[in-house]
Amino acid sequence: MSDVKKFDYVIVGGGSAGCVVANRLSEDPSVTVCLLEAGPKESRKGRIPLMLHALMGDPQRNWDRYTVKQPNLNNRAIYQPCGRGLGGGSAINSMIYIRGFKPDYDNWAAQGNFGWGYDDVLPYFKKSEDHQDGESEYHGVGGELSVSRLRHVERPTEVLLDAARECGYPVVDDFNHANVEGFAPYQVTQVNGERCSSARAFIEPAQSRPNLTVITGTHVSRVMFDGQEGLPRASGVEYRQDGVTKTVEATREVVLSAGAVGSAQLLLLSGIGPAEHLQEMGIAQVADVPGVGQNFQDHIDVGMSFHAKPGFGLGISPQFMPRAIKGVWQYFAGGRRGVFASNVVEGGGFIRTNPEEDAPDVQFHFLSGNASNNGRSLNYGHSFTLTACVLRPNSRGQLRLAAADPMVPPAIDPCFLTQEGDLKTLVDGVKVVKQLLTSDAFKPYRKGQRFPDMALGSDEAIVEHIKANAGTAYHPVGTCKMGPESDSMAVVSPELSVRGVSGLRVADASIMPTIVSGNTNAPSIMIGEKASDLVKASWKN
């Protein structure tokens, strides 16, 4: 065992939230902060938005997990990627900046999570933000995270907006206002045409601080606890690096920011979780917390795709080569513009399939390129794809250890479509997908159906398509649920402190009691912001 290093705060996970926590806590020069990350530092090529597919397919930057087989999806294991490296998911995602809707957060507060209503969290969204359009009621300026409109929008995305108008759906300006319904190009986390990950936004400006230590290539195996009287206190963590087991101590707190999969797995490995499961795994119990790993939620997602005429949108073809060559010049010599500034998933929308809902219940993502292999490759030819996802699924899954070995991936079971209402919402979403892609707006560019290989002429056919092809929008949350003392399944308090122990918090998407209505990167950054203030408040003199 090597020499033990001591810090005031130890943060596990340098993802969307963890980078924020590391930055904010190290603002105080009187404290020391250590950030541990399993993956590598962010790559320069990863800042090119069009490199999205290459990043998704890089096992050094993606945990590349799969769920257990899903009975309601033809017994298929579903791809469940997760960012691995500084920036986490924000370093490999499609850069879409969406916060969710006001009722999402007001519902959190109504469940007993004081301080987490929309009016409470909006200032934290704005605090991080440096928005291209300037300051407003809903947007901030001067923050570390650059949010902008796309510098480059492909023709297929423009046609999508025409199709929306043709089908009677509004085209809106900004999804991050109130409960906006309609279609638009997405706003993105980009700065001057480059990806602005959480690592770039929050770690780069802070890395010169002498009180911040960032260690990459570390696989944390457990949280350590001291033997003092009363509640067990988190005293540090054990991790593996280059085949050597090491420890680092925390004199104040340990903060887990390893994501909905990683944080729950680490709690279980550390002896915090359902007593029966810990016993089954042969792990000594530190605290019986039944909710650890429960409440798993994700956005189930399925789409439809058409072959496109040569040269329509992104793809690999002779027709695209002149644009690609021009794009190289536009991006690298012309101020980060042109096709290489595209985030591929350029546009989408939100609609209400059920008029009784208080906010849109389906989100759409539009791909203007010929992508496949779960988004990990851009293929020969041209196509356009639109997917629909259920924004507030009622189905709840769980995460369990597959083994007590921290190097063994956990068993992820989303329990997709175990609640009938989720299937109905997704069927209604697919009907809108078909309506838009078969509209007259796309007719000049549409060649033939690419995916699925069946007609979707009835609800029964759509259900079969969903069972055979549905996946996820890559938004896992909820496994370390936040809730009041009266909630027996809550893992953390509204202050994000882990039940049954002291000196340990969770700050990432795993604390969401219910999933937000949209992409989860911006909410995770917000959680990091609020968590930092909660930690600081606990240690304020």
Image (tube, grey):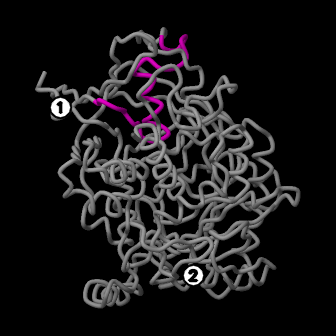
Residue 452, percent from left and from top: 64, 59
- Picture residue at 65% right of the left edge, 88% below the top: 444
Q: Which residue is mark 2?
A: 156
**Amino acid beneath label 2:** Pro
Q: Eyeballing the image, is 16 above or below 125?
A: above
Residue range highlighted in magenta: 250-278
Which of these two is toward me, 371 or 333? 333
Asked which secondary structure carries label 1, the reply is strand
Q: In percent of the image, x 19 and y 25: which residue is there?
A: 245
Q: Residue furthest left?
A: 2
User: What residue does disc 1 label?
Assistant: 5
Q: Is residue 118 above or below residue 443?
A: above
Nearer to me, 83 or 411: 83
Mark 1 burial class by Cα count in 10 Å: few <14, some 14-19, many 20+: few
Residue 522 appears at what percent x and percent y? 51, 59
- Front-most of 334 and 500? 500
Q: Quadrant of the N terminus?
A: top left
| Number of residues whose C-alpha sits closer than 10 Å to that of mark 2, classed few (under 14), some (14–19) or many (20 or more) | many
Q: Per the image, is 274 magenta?
A: yes
Residue 321 place in picture, x, y as percent: 35, 85
User: What kind of residue is marked 1?
Assistant: Lys
Q: To which quarter of the image does residue 191 belong?
A: bottom left
Task: Tell me what residue is drawn at x 66 percent, y 82 percent.
Answer: 161
